[in-house]
Image: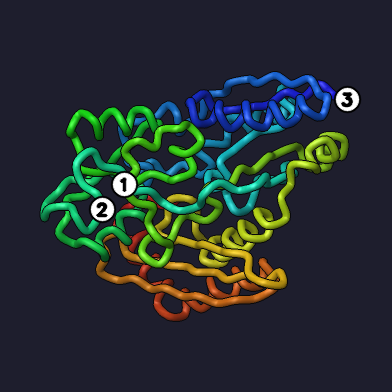
Amino acid sequence: MAHLRIGSRGSKLALWQSNHICALLREQGHTVDIQIIQTTGDKITDVALAKVGTKGMFTKEIEEALAAGEVDLAVHSLKDLPTELPPGFEIAAIPKREDPLDAFLSAQFASIEGLPPGARVGTSSLRRQAQLMVLRPDLDIHPLRGNVDTRLRKLEAGEYAAIILAAAGVNRLGLTALVRQIIPADAMCPAAGQGALGIEIREGDAATRQHLAFLDDPAARATTTCERALLNAMGGGCQVPIGAFAEMGDGGSLRLQAVVAHPDGSSVLRESQSGSDPLKLGETVGQVLLKRGGSAILEAVYSSGISTK
């Protein structure tokens, strides 16, 4: 058995995720401790994510500790990991996935459809904003940063009529009291890898990889590989207005739904295809979206001055 050191962000959700992995490793007989590492994304809380423009903003400092041998593994929200990892790292395991969809939370209103015109809705995600503008162009969408607790406090204080969060985060923290609606993927396609954890290690660390092998879930690995392949094919980072949602079908086949949209909802492209090879399916759907006009949408976003790295 091994002594394993986990690098983690310090938010409640990040620590829940790291403690969850910690408990599973201890069940295998390992001794484990968690080291909290503050990232760039944790330090910048008053600016919309899309305007920060720092690639790997929630992962860079943790990867530095990993490279220096200060920790043995890092537990990330997979959607925060760039589709191409920096040299020297690998994803050793993707555990069983939580709900990948987005959730609508409100103290007053039962659904997106039930919001009055002009209602203020909080989200800092260009992807959520774009799809919300398609559903309800009459809403007033405002940036909303901070951890899940902070966002919920702002909602409860009446600063927002509603907020949109990942269902996985509120489920993991048991903060589901104000969840009114889980938004279907065909209305709000989630981020690539949403709801999944990525366990990162130093590339070539065979011993740690072997200790983590039992955590890797084949379905989570296949669906997120497909989604991340689409994001990579489109040249997108975690802040671009691109959604990707893959589901396992019968006989190991995959169905991938994807969307690329201008943040103001003026231009939205959706594509859905099935296939058996996760990488090939993701790349194919990504290329189709680019050819159908996705390139023009993304160029318009980049040229608008909104950072999407």
Nearer-N-terminus badge (1/3): 3
Residue 56: image location, x then y, percent: 54, 41
Judge from the rendering whether residue 2 lies leftward or rightward of residue 305; answer left or right.
right
Residue 1 tag number:
3
Name the residue tied to disc 2: 111
SS assignment at label 3 = loop
Quadrant in the picture for residue 41: top left
Task: In this rendered view, identify the residue nearer to me: 176 or 47.
Answer: 176
Q: Quadrant of the N terminus?
A: top right
Residue 192: image location, x then y, percent: 52, 56
Residue 10: image location, x then y, percent: 52, 23
- Label 2–label 3 contact, CB within 8 A: no
Disc 2 to disc 3, C-alpha distance = 49 Å
Residue 180 tag number:
1
User: Which three-letter amino acid code belongs to the residue tagged 2?
Assistant: Ser
Quadrant in the picture for residue 113: bottom left
Q: Residue at x 32, y 33 (%)?
A: 151
Q: Residue at x 58, y 30 (%)?
A: 61
Task: In this rendered view, identify the residue nearer to me: 140 or 71.
Answer: 140
Nearer-N-terminus badge (2/3): 3
Nearer-N-terminus badge (1/2): 2
Q: Nearer the viewer, mark 1 or mark 3?
A: 1
Residue 250 tag number:
none
SS assignment at label 1 = strand
Q: Residue at x 67, y 32 (%)?
A: 21
- Label 1–label 3 contact, CB within 8 A: no
Residue 102: image location, x then y, percent: 41, 51
- Label 1–label 2 contact, CB within 8 A: yes
User: Which three-letter amino acid code belongs to the residue tagged 3?
Assistant: Met
Task: In this rendered view, identify the residue nearer to me: 164 or 248.
Answer: 248
User: Which three-letter amino acid code belongs to the residue tagged 1?
Assistant: Arg
Disc 1 crowd, CA 10 A, few/some/many (<14, 14-19, 20+): some
